[in-house]
Image (tube, rainbow, N blue to C red):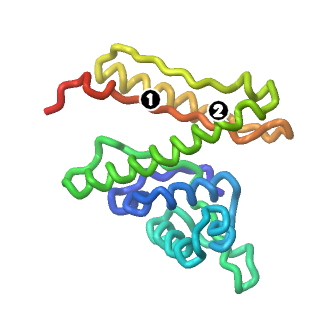
């Protein structure tokens, strides 16, 4: 998989306004290429629905056929990019802003499920991995300009991390949610 990221256009983003598609794309990124049948079993869907969601993702450039796999009968799919980034300030029309809102709702659903699973599995992890886990939050009083610099700094730090190919390495999730405290900023 290419180590690039994609910043989708509002039209492309429509493919990610369904939590199943966000989950599916995540599975292909983390677990590697799969068939619609394999994904259907893992997601608890029928193969027809899974194939439909894969076509929607493919039409918008998020997944592509893995032509090095399969036997003509099984069609394999892989993620086209390693990361998806979004500009939440984008969207000039009400339709584009609605698409962004629907996408963000899907992402929050999937992130919340992942966070819940991590809490459920925490007691089962080896101590060395439990020690790396935190569920912390900070509420800081910042201007919009300082908040933007903070997010840019966090993104820069994450982009600079070199992944390890060591046998003791595992996929490690870092979720960054940065937003004005709900109800504390006057809206216009």
Looking at the picture, tell me which residue is in the foreground, 128 or 44: 44
Badge 1, how many Cα within 10 Å: few under 14, some, many 20+? few
* 2 and 1 marks in contact (CB < 8 Å): no
> Who's the residue at 76% across and 37% down the image?
164
Dot 2 falls on a residue whose secondary structure is loop
Badge 2, how many Cα within 10 Å: few under 14, some, many 20+? few
Q: Which residue is mark 2?
A: 161
- Please indicate whether residue 164 sits to the left or right of residue 172 in the image: right
Q: Which mark is residue 16?
A: none
Dot 2 or dot 1: first in sequence order is 1
- Please indicate whether residue 159 sits to the left or right of residue 89 in the image: right
x%, y% of residue 167?
Answer: 86, 40
- Please indicate whether residue 187 sits to the left or right of residue 20 in the image: left
Q: Which mark is residue 152?
A: 1
155 versus 43 height, above or below: above
101 versus 21 height, above or below: above
* Figure quadrant of the C terminus: top left
x%, y% of residue 44?
Answer: 61, 65
The tally of labels here is: 2
173 versus 19 height, above or below: above
x%, y% of residue 79?
Answer: 60, 60
> Who's the residue at 55% across and 65% down the image?
63
């Amino acid at each position: 998989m290419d180590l690039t990221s994609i910043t989708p256009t509002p039209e492309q983003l429509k493919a990610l306004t369904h939590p199943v598609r966000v989950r599916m794309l995540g599975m292909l990124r983390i677990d590697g290429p799969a068939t619609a049948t394999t994904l259907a079993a893992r997601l608890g869907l029928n193969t027809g629905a899974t194939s439909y969601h894969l076509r929607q993702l493919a039409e918008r450039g998020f997944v592509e056929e893995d032509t090095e796999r399969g036997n003509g009968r099984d069609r394999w799919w892989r993620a086209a990019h390693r990361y998806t980034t979004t500009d939440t300030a984008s969207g000039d029309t009400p339709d584009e802003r609605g698409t962004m809102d629907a996408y963000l709702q899907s992402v929050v659903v999937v992130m919340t499920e992942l966070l819940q699973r991590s809490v459920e599995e925490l007691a089962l992890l080896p101590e060395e991995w439990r020690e790396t886990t935190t569920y912390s939050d900070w509420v800081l009083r910042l201007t919009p300009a300082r908040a933007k610099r903070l997010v840019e700094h966090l993104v820069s730090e994450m982009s600079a991390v070199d992944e390890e190919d060591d046998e003791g390495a595992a996929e490690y999730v870092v979720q960054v949610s940065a937003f004005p405290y709900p109800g504390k900023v006057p809206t216009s």
